[in-house]
Image (cartoon, rainbow, N blue to C red):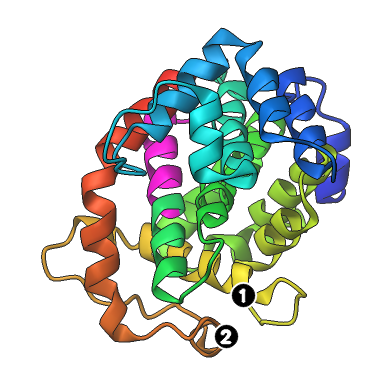
Amino acid sequence: MGSAIDLIKTCETLPSLPEAYFRIQQIVNDPEGSMLDLAKAISIDPALTARVLKLVNSAFYDMPRKVETVSRAASMLGMFPIHDLVLATSVTNAFSNMTQTIMDMKTFWRQSVVCGLLARELGKQAGLLDSERLFVEGLLCDIGHLVMYIQIPGPAQAALSQHQETGRPLFEIERERLGFDFAEVGAGLLEEWNLPQNFQEALRAHTDFQGTTDYALEAGMLHVAGSLTRNHTIDETQPQWPTDVNANAWEITGLTEDCLIPVLEAVRPQLDSVLGLIIQAR
């Protein structure tokens, strides 16, 4: 069937990110780029401006007062968090034409938002200063499945059915049947979009986590967040840590059993608000 990269390269309907995002990415990566440059680049696109301000004013940040302008948001949050919010809304918008007959998109985005919020809160519990970035990485964890359902819906669905029947990890079944898994496809898509290297590598390594990548800490956070998401822990009244978390993830992330309840308590109030905004972005 070829490789994950082959799947990306041969996809004639591969979604692309908007030019506005790449202008913003260039400003953020430019040592001379300023907050004013960033605010101007976002403000050129009224729809993008509205989406960013809605996210900034949502429960995601719980601002003490309403933020009225992008320049104010940038000065309060910094350039990289604003970049990540733009990326989050751009990615969800890129797949806005995907039909419900291929995949239940509401369920897909709910799981993706849950994973992103969990990754962010796990990062906070671990004391990471840049835990905000983990939201976008978590949001993108399952993005490879969208490409697979566009390109190879039959084999992708067959792998999912086998996973549901046997309970075996989906990534293992995909590797056996297809020669690659959804994380490899997702990482290939991020590479095609020229997203940061840490996004690509953390995504690629988060399924069968071994802790050997240069971005092992981020990958470990995504591994734990993905496990919590798959096991529907967020909806349980008496949640427990899933048993499929790799032991290496506990060691590298420094997470403990004590952080589960605080993480879930932080995520639950944010979910509906952030999910609504992500779906609106589509």
Residue 54, by quadrant, is top left
The secondary structure making up most of the magenta span is helix
Residue in the image at 46% along x and 51% along y: 116
Q: Tag 1: residue type?
A: Leu
Residue in the image at 63% along x and 24% along y: 39
Closer to the camera in the image, 216 or 83: 83
Q: CA distance from mark 2 to mark 1?
A: 6 Å
Relative to 173, residue 14 above or below: above
Label 2 vs 1, first from the N-terminus: 1
The disc label shown at residue 76, or none: none
Closer to the camera in the image, 161 or 134: 134
Can residue 130 be seen by looking at this rendering?
A: yes
Relative to 26, residue 142 above or below: below
Residue in the image at 69% along x and 47% along y: 186
Q: Tag 2: residue type?
A: Ile
User: Measured from the top left, where is residue 97 in percent x and y?
Assistant: 57, 15
Relative to 145, residue 133 above or below: below
The disc label shown at residue 252, or none: 2
User: Measured from the top left, where is residue 246 in percent x and y?
Assistant: 52, 82
Residue 121 among those drawn in magenta: no
Q: Are marks 2 and 1 in contact (CB under 8 Å)?
A: yes
The region drawn magenta spans 102-115
Residue 222, by quadrant, is bottom right
Kindly state the secondary structure of the residue where label 2 is placed. Answer: helix
User: Measured from the top left, where is residue 220 in percent x and y?
Assistant: 57, 73
Packing grade of label 1 (10 A; few <14, some 14-19, many >=20) is many
Closer to the camera in the image, 241 or 68: 68
